[in-house]
Amino acid sequence: MLYRKDEITGNSLSQLGFGCMRLPRSAFGIDIKESEEIIRLAIDNGINFFDTAYMYKGSEEALGTIINNLRVRDKIYLTSKLPWLMAKKSEDLENYLNESLSRLKTDYIDYYFIHLLTDYSAWEKLVSWGIIERIDEWKKSGKIRSIGFSFHGSYSDYIKILNAYDWEMCILQYNYSDENFQAGIRGIRAAKKRGIPVVIMEPLLGGRLANALPEKALHEFRHANTLAGINRTPAEWAFDWLWNQPEPTVILSGMNSVSMVKENITSASRAKEGMLTESELSTIQKVREIWNESNKVNCTGCGYCMPCPMGVNIPGCFASYNASFSQGRMYGLRSYFMSTSLLNNPQIASKCVRCGKCEKICPQKIPIMESLADVKKRLEPAPFMLMMMLSRKFTGKDKKK
Ligand code: SF4
Ligand code: SF4
């Protein structure tokens, strides 16, 4: 494993961080046995940065149990995030931190983040709730060691927040699909200039840059691999593009299988700043252009917008919609049918009643209601609806209870 330095604390952080939002699940929640196996593998191979959040369902509890079972608390840097959006009053902030500590079965968090800051007014609200005094107390009492924020918003809001406090880390979304999305490369460089380490989230755009690239893009990668005599997977291309740059400190990956951990560790053990050739960078540029032609809705599948009160499977609808452009309309229709219509309650786009609840929380600022109307138009043609009705009738899904 290769490490990059947090210049503020002096900590050597593994350049591959373990994102715990997508730990493997069974019907009963997070599968502790399987998660423990992959976390042990990660630690044995040098990963020392583990990222979770109060809002990742079951993740803090699972991680706390596993860290305790493996007795590795002093070998890793642990993060969590303050769910300030759920808070009704300032006292809630303290309660959420205490709850995170208890779920994680630890008495300190190495890096604590204000979760999901989207604009400067959010920070102002927190300041009016006394967040600055609270951070001081939390640090004095040893409950947290460093403070940071995760951000989804415009570059201009980001800069205002960055300059408003002595931050010690920030988490930003960044990948090759768009260098200027949200804070983007300018935001990363601005943090670096202030000596603030930057952690990258969504390096694969919710896995889509690994497993949902159009055939034309895959062809570009295969061709470049053949020319260079290498065998980089699409995920490795995406990670290498990030590690090629000096600015990011840790790249988070939401790993949920042994094979994924092994593949990522292999990449992280050899990937260095400046490793990509001009020709490899131009391959990525071509793939970026192809991707952006087919990527219609920028949904990462984070699930923050769920559950929808009407039962719409919002990320599922967008995944099928995007696939209908990147992999063909029939493919998208089939995926839409399988993932939304064969369930006990069909979770299709046309069930949306435009209540607007989901749009308030979406970190990607997707106009969800408008986009669902596009999904409906493309993926719910009359023959599809007829097929859905017949299949539900024959499989007994519409029987009255
Ligand atoms: S706007 Fe539509 S999709 Fe969003 S929460 Fe309301 S009903 Fe669900
Ligand atoms: S629509 Fe937004 S909040 Fe919902 S899963 Fe996609 S990115 Fe996340």
Image (cartoon, rainbow, N blue to C red):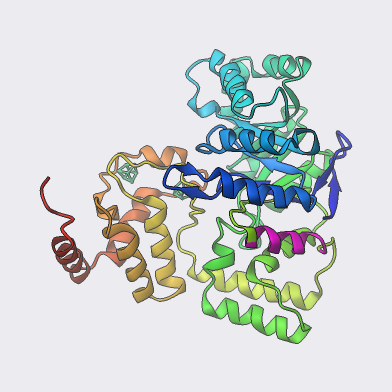
Looking at the image, which is closer to me, 346 or 101?
A: 101
Looking at the image, which is closer to me, 139 or 105?
A: 105
Image quadrant of residue 190?
Answer: top right
Image quadrant of residue 107?
Answer: top right
Looking at the image, which is closer to me, 224 or 122?
A: 224
Looking at the image, which is closer to me, 377 or 55?
A: 55
Instruction: Tell me where residue 334 appears, x and y as whole percent.
Output: 33, 70
Q: Which residues are magenta?
A: 259-270
Whether residue 266 is in magenta: the answer is yes
The quadrant of the picture showing ligand 1 is top left
In the image, taking residue 395 as reference, residue 167 lies left or right, namely right
Q: Quadrant of the N terminus?
A: bottom right
In the image, taking residue 197 as reference, residue 332 lies left or right, namely left
- Vertical placement of residue 155 versus 318, above or below: above
- Vertical placement of residue 337 versus 99, above or below: below
Q: Quadrant of the C terminus?
A: top left
Report the residue at 64% width, 44% height from top.
155
- Vertical placement of residue 188 versus 338, above or below: above
